[in-house]
Amino acid sequence: MIPPPQDPYRRRIDYLRLSVTDRCNLRCTYCMPREGVQKLPHEDILRYEEILRLVRIVTAMGISKIRITGGEPLVRKDLLYLCESIARFSGLKSLSITTNGVLLPKFAKDLFGAGIKRINVSLDTLRPEKYAAITQMDCFHQVWDGILKAHEIGFRPIKLNAVVMRGINDDEIEDLGRLTFRYPFHVRFIEFMPFQAEAGDQRFLSADDILSRLSRVAPLVAAPKDGDTNGPASHFRFRDALGKIGIISPVSHHFCPTCNRLRVTADGGLRTCLFSTSEVDLRTPLRGGASEERIMEIIRRAIVEKPEKHSLESAVFRKCISRPMFSIGG
Ligand code: SAM
Ligand code: SF4
């Protein structure tokens, strides 16, 4: 195994979140700008051969975990071909996908066959009407059927991601947590990040508040971390539950000291921090025939510049950066 690159803060960078599209079949209010979406021009989006070249390069550098994301990755044409091709890289220890689940009933079986065994599905509510209000699409049952199908097919782990918003779905924290008694899912609660927030937005609820609501259900005990991604979640479980609870708190507690990740946007922008203002263009060298060594050098230089931490107080975070989540690749 090739040792992963290290940044100046001794973080081992072994994880890439790879966005394959900025398109999406939902319009989640916390993710998409209210005024509508400026789509990337088609020709700017990395082609599959460019993505596969990039994967070859990063795996040769010691990146061993890749998560496919978007936008909604399952809306990209022939995604199964891409998954299958990435799964063949011998240097990869983990290949996973983050999806809104709408197309899971259609694709779950083939995704599994293509070599993806780990899946994260976004699910902010268990109530169909509220689902429609949050995502602006009436797809709750499709998503829930997709999750059950993924479970039946054998995806492990299945992680359900809920963005918690005060006054919108915080009344369901307990019910979402109780799912872990019934299913071996990891239910993860994510602090709402104010990407599109306007002054006076009250939706933010802290991880500590989320935990205290959960502890009304039953006592929570610490659970071991996943070995796979060194991810940002803190892990708990209810005694006797089948699944785990995760809390992801980008706003109230920094997970920067253990951040092991890079992101590549659908148009080939390399971001070393979710909250960066800057990106390194990989599309031009990938498309322009730059050598693998040259592209490795560009990536290595970006890793050296990876910020030590993001500042939530900064104007950058408040304005939330140059791109919203669907466009960065969450
Ligand atoms: N479309 C896929 C999905 O929804 O799972 C993958 C991309 S989506 C951008 C990835 C994750 O970002 C989702 O779990 C979503 O809930 C999260 N996300 C988007 N906007 C967010 C925000 N403002 N605060 C916290 N999480 C957010
Ligand atoms: Fe689409 Fe995912 Fe953003 Fe929702 S969170 S709008 S599903 S990209």
Image (cartoon, helix red, strand yellow):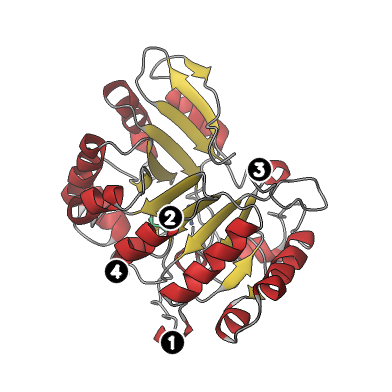
The residue sitting at 42% across, 26% down in the picture is 244
Q: Nearer the viewer, mark 1 or mark 2?
A: 2
Residue 168 x %, y %: 36, 47
Residue 52 can be seen, yes or no: yes
Residue 278 can be seen, yes or no: no
Circle 4: residue type: Asp
Q: Residues within 10 Å of mark 1 (few under 14, many from 20)?
A: few
Q: Is residue 230 left or right of residue 23?
A: right
Q: Are marks 2 and 4 in contact (CB under 8 Å)?
A: no
Circle 2: residue type: Arg
9 to 322, vertically: above or below: above
The residue sitting at 25% across, 36% down in the picture is 151
Q: Which mark is residue 88?
A: 2
- Per the model, the C-alpha gap separating discs 3 and 2 is 31 Å
292 to 208, vertically: above or below: below
- Per the model, the C-alpha gap separating discs 1 and 3 is 35 Å
Give the residue number, with chain letter if any, for mark 4.
Answer: 78
Give the residue number, with chain letter if any, for mark 1.
Answer: 43
- Per the model, the C-alpha gap separating discs 4 and 1 is 17 Å
The residue sitting at 49% across, 57% down in the picture is 330
Q: Nearer the viewer, mark 3 or mark 2?
A: 2
Residue 131 x %, y %: 26, 51
